[in-house]
Image: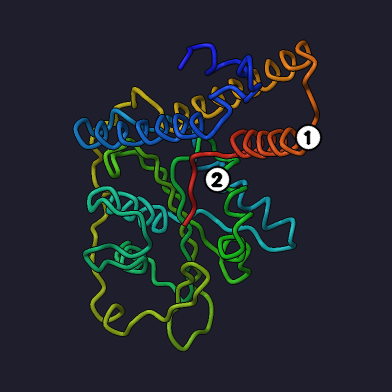
Amino acid sequence: MALHNWFLPHPDTHKKAHLLSWEGLVIYILIFILLQVSFSIVGFSKPGVLGISANIDQKKLIELTNIEREKMGLSRVVENEALDKAAVLKAQNMLSENYWAHFAPSGKSPWDFILGSGYKFTYAGENLAKNFYNSDDIVKAWMNSPTHRDNLLNGKYKDIGIAVVEGTLNGQQTTLIVQMFGTTDMLAAKPAMEVQGKQIAVPEQALDNQPRLGTAVIAQKPVVKPLLDPYAVSKTAGISVLVLITFLLIVDVWVLKKRGVFRFSSHHVAHMALLSLAAGSLIMSGPGQVL
């Protein structure tokens, strides 16, 4: 198989370059599989080398939250020291137990951290986020998720606590964001908490045996900035492949026109549509997740 056939249409059959065929598709898939496998190996063998370096501000998150609440005519939530502490302890627990969820593998629940911080709530809620580059994108992501939006815009809340904690999660340097809401001045038969769009009544046992987590925030290990951003590498690789395919399509059209055999067909439309969709998805995508 001649090397130039990978980049140029076949001189006799005018078949498209191999890099525009299924053979090329297999190569692109293998490249991305190799990338992901490499990231997994590095994350396992050298925890913290991979990760995202974020610039997230706790105070700005609170302000952005209140801006969204005011747009809907809701009262502002006020930063509460106990909820701040609860949020930090929840984030640190996710790192220490290596999980990304509202409930810990050990059985700890969101209200355990709130009650353990000394905040006696009648109604509370929790939003989580990780691996965002800035504060604005976090609040936008919460607002774009119906359950997180409803939690953020819940008129019952009076207080807020925010934690931004960095550490190693699943082998990668990760920035965790925990948003805790609460109120203590409502009449309620039983305290309840909003988690992932569901209102959960706090068990009697949790109220009777409230864990005491102390007054000081648990000391964090020194944070080492990651050497490589896996998301940025994957995105760059994806864009590079799209640029290569676009270039090969242009060369394909140019060569076939010179040979006098070019015919615009539905295949060209399909190629351009897929390229546009893939490019748009790559450009608009981000590494952050909300829960």
Q: Secondary structure at mark 2?
A: helix
Q: In this orientation, which residue lies closer to the viewer: 160 or 128?
A: 128
Q: Position of residue 131 (x, y in %)?
A: 44, 40
Q: In the rendered image, which residue does mark 2 sit on? A: 138
Q: Looking at the image, which residue is at 19% across and 33% down? A: 45
Question: Where in the figure is residue 151, as x and y percent of width and height?
Answer: 56, 65
- Of residues 190 and 235, the one nearer the viewer is 235
Instruction: Judge left or right: residue 122 versus residue 281.
Output: left
Q: Position of residue 270 (x, y in %)?
A: 71, 39
- Report the mark closest to the observer, 1 or 2: 1
The image's colour scheme reads rainbow
Label 1 neighbourhood size at 10 Å, few (<14), some (14-19), many (20+)?
A: few
The three-letter amino acid code for the residue at tag 1 is Ser
Q: Position of residue 162 (x, y in %)?
A: 46, 50
Q: Residue furthest front?
A: 12
Q: In which quadrant of the rendered view does residue 166 lie?
A: top left
Front residue (pair 160, 229): 229
Q: Name which residue type carries label 2.
A: Ile
Q: Is residue 42 above or below residue 192?
A: above
Quadrant for residue 168, please give it.
top left
Pointer 2: residues within 10 angstroms few (<14), some, or many (20+)? Answer: many
Q: Which mark is residue 265?
A: 1
Disc on the earlier residue, 1 or 2? 2
Which quadrant holds the N terminus? Answer: top left
Numbered tag placed on residue 158 in the rendering = none
Please determine whether, in this image, residue 91 is positioned above or below residue 251: below
* Figure check: 67 above or below 257: below
Residue plotted at (63% across, 17% down):
12
Residue at 49% x, 25% y: name it. Answer: 237
